[in-house]
Image (cartoon, coloured by chain):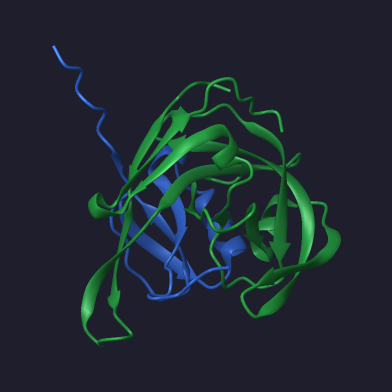
Chain colours: A green, B blue
Amino acid sequence: MSSLDFRFNYKRIPAIDSDTGEARDFFYPYVPCILSSERRSTELLEGLLDSGSDGIVLPRRIADYLELNLERAPPIRVVGSKIDRFRARISIRIGRAGRFSDPIVNVKVSVTEGNDSPIILGRDPLFKLYRITFIDPENRLEMLPYPGKSARS
Amino acid sequence: MKEKEPVSVDLGTVSGPEGHWVVVVNGKVIASSEDACEMLKLAEKYHSEDVVVTKILYPNASYF
């Protein structure tokens, strides 16, 4: 894997705070990435970096675009419920504006039937390949390549 | 001399209907839809370095 480090400011999304009814800015640890299957690649996407998720989760319509071979898998357990899912494999590159990691290949992902969640970038593989720091007071994150780790998962 | 810390890449600001996928070209939202696949197909029509497809998250939500 190329030893590129990445630093991203959180994505700013102005919205009405449902708790207060007032307009304010929300900041999210999005990471720009390109997803690929054996058949095609996406344009640049943004996925939500999530240390609470075991792996990568894609909504079904992203999988449809990539023409992934989906394999039925046991439901994902989330707080208080289960969500039906499929399994598939993709490649992922992190970065933007011409500065990208090497492809992280053969990555196992979960595909949920719904289209309502974002792309979730969980711990496997990104947190195994990078030392990741969320710097919430500054609304930014850092991804430093972990020495000796390979992108071949 | 102390090395200057690299500058963070700014992912910018985006607005649109909550829960929608949006196509952003050169910083401007040009389309939105609940259908991520349709937005990815639309994004193909633009120069790769100018376009990003992202999602407007619901405020105060938790995902998984």
Q: Is residue B63 above or below residue B23?
A: below
Where is residue A23, by image quadrant? bottom left
Q: Is residue A15 above or below residue A39?
A: below
Where is residue A34, by image quadrant? top right
- Rendered location of residue A102, percent (x, y): 57, 26
Q: Quadrant of the C terminus of chain A?
A: top right
Q: Residue at x 56, y 58 (%)?
A: A119
Toward the viewer: B30 or B36? Answer: B36
Toward the viewer: B33 or A62? Answer: A62
Q: Quadrant of the N terminus of chain A?
A: top right
Q: Residue at x 78, y 51 (%)?
A: A88
Q: Is residue A34 above or below residue A121?
A: above
Q: Is residue A55 above or below residue B64?
A: above
- Rendered location of residue B18, percent (x, y): 42, 76
- Rendered location of residue A60, percent (x, y): 69, 64
Tally the numbered discs: 0
Toward the viewer: B2 or A140? Answer: B2
In the image: residue A40, left or right of residue B1? right
